[in-house]
Image (tube, rainbow, N blue to C red):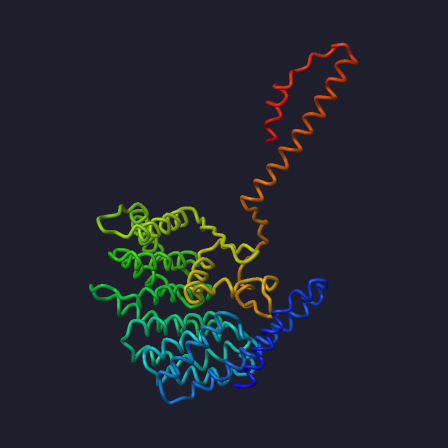
Amino acid sequence: MGKRGSRRKSAESLGTNDDDSVSSSSADMSKLTLVSRTEVVQRDSSLDSWLEALYEKRGSTREKALSLIIEAFTKNLQHQFVEKNFVTLLDRYLHSIKRGSAKEICLASRALGLLAMITEDKAHELLEASLHPLSEALKSGSEISKISHIIECLAVITFIGDNDGEESEGVMQIIWEFICQKTGSKSKLSPAVITAISSWSFILSNANGCCLNSKNWQEAVSHFSTLLEKDDRSVCIAAGEALAILFEIGCPKIKKDSADAIQQLKGKILYQVEDLSREAGGRGSNKEDLGSQRNLFRDLLKFLRDGSCPETSMKIGGDLLNTDTWSELIQLNLLKHFLGERFSKHMQSATNLPLPNQENELLRSRYKFTLMKKHISSGEKKLQKSQFASSHKEMTRALNKERNSSQQAKSGHFAACDDSEWVHRSGAFD
């Protein structure tokens, strides 16, 4: 406790001497570096204590420690701490998934996904060690929240850790069996099913179709077409995104005897998609969900007709994150959902962060970024307009003076327009 107190006091004292360093920008940078290093030491000390708490017998203690670790990992990417403690973190997370309560399993699944995002070079090792425990936890669980967290974790660690597609096929099969089992009845579908559909699409978008043969592709298209008839808009949207991915990658090695069946199926889906893109809202309907549904299926309808994918741009720090394929769009949607409000932090450029190596190069390397044009505030626009108007008046006076001098010199050889006409014409510059 004494060491932590001294570190805290040291950080505070470094932060209160700004007046003494105004004259030297190099001193400012040195001070910022010292403060940053002190904060890192304090943070690592806290992380060490939370990691130690994962060995505690009391489940509530482990749950609290997992919550604090997740918060720390989403605020800042703890590269050095993770590199030093990767094996221990992985072991403790899997222990919680195997033996913890439903709440602890949810937290450990989320922590495991974050760990995979931070340690790209060890992501495959993490995936291999985690597949069996997560699969077993999925089979033994009935709580909706627990199932959703496990499935989403499976999707994220497979997306990052599977380099050759071998694990992707197995994970997709696990999720597919869950989808078929839960959507076979006429009862209302749980949010876990929607998570499963989105996660299945997410993995497929990264596997480039290598996980599906022609038969599986047709089976998936047919099943998701059936889900478009559900009354739940969230289910329809998830099924629509899955169909978008399936048609974007295309049916592998179409056989002649199945070509007609595929065309008929596509015709049916076109009719369904067009209907959903124009659906009217009934009494008590959620306008936001209805708007999302219409927008998605309008984009999907255009894509099925002429192959045009929706293009999107998102502001990330000083950059624009651009998508122009369904695969990219669906990947980013799930990553945003998984990371929550810290999504931008993981995608942000290193130049906008106070500490080195805090950007997630794994995610940035997968997507297209462009430098964003500088945003001009309304106040800056007013100032620019005022400065321009002032300079414009001076220019008008100078031109009028020059014109009058020319008229006097040439004794009226040229007819000149009066001042009001000149100002009116020059108004195009305002």
Is 5 or 142 nearer to us in this picture?
5
395 vs 360: above or below? above
Viewer-closest of 186 and 255: 186
Residue 125: % across, % down: 50, 80
The number of numbered badges drawn on the structure is 0
Q: Where is residue 131 in the image (x, y as percent from the top left)?
A: 41, 79
What is the x, y in percent for residue 326?
44, 56
Tell me if 282 is positioned left or right of 173 in this view.
Answer: left
396 or 300, which lies in front? 396
The answer, for residue 164, to whether it is visible in the render is no
Q: Is residue 93 above or below residue 328?
A: below
Q: For residue 176, what is the image quadrant?
A: bottom left
Compared across the picture, whether 17 is left or right of 137 comes to: right
**What residue is at 24 percent from the left and 56 percent from the top?**
231
Farthest-out residue, left: 186
Q: Which of 360 and 199 is in front in this view?
A: 360
Q: Which residue lies furthest to the right in this view?
A: 409
Residue at position x 74%, y 21% in the image: 402
Q: Is residue 177 visible?
A: yes
Percent x, y of residue 269: 32, 52
Q: Tell me where residue 22 sits by quadrant.
A: bottom right
Horizontal side of 160 relative to 395 (left or right) equals left
- Image: 224 above or below 273: below
Q: In which quarter of the image is residue 262?
A: bottom left
What is the quadrant of the C terminus in the image?
Answer: top right
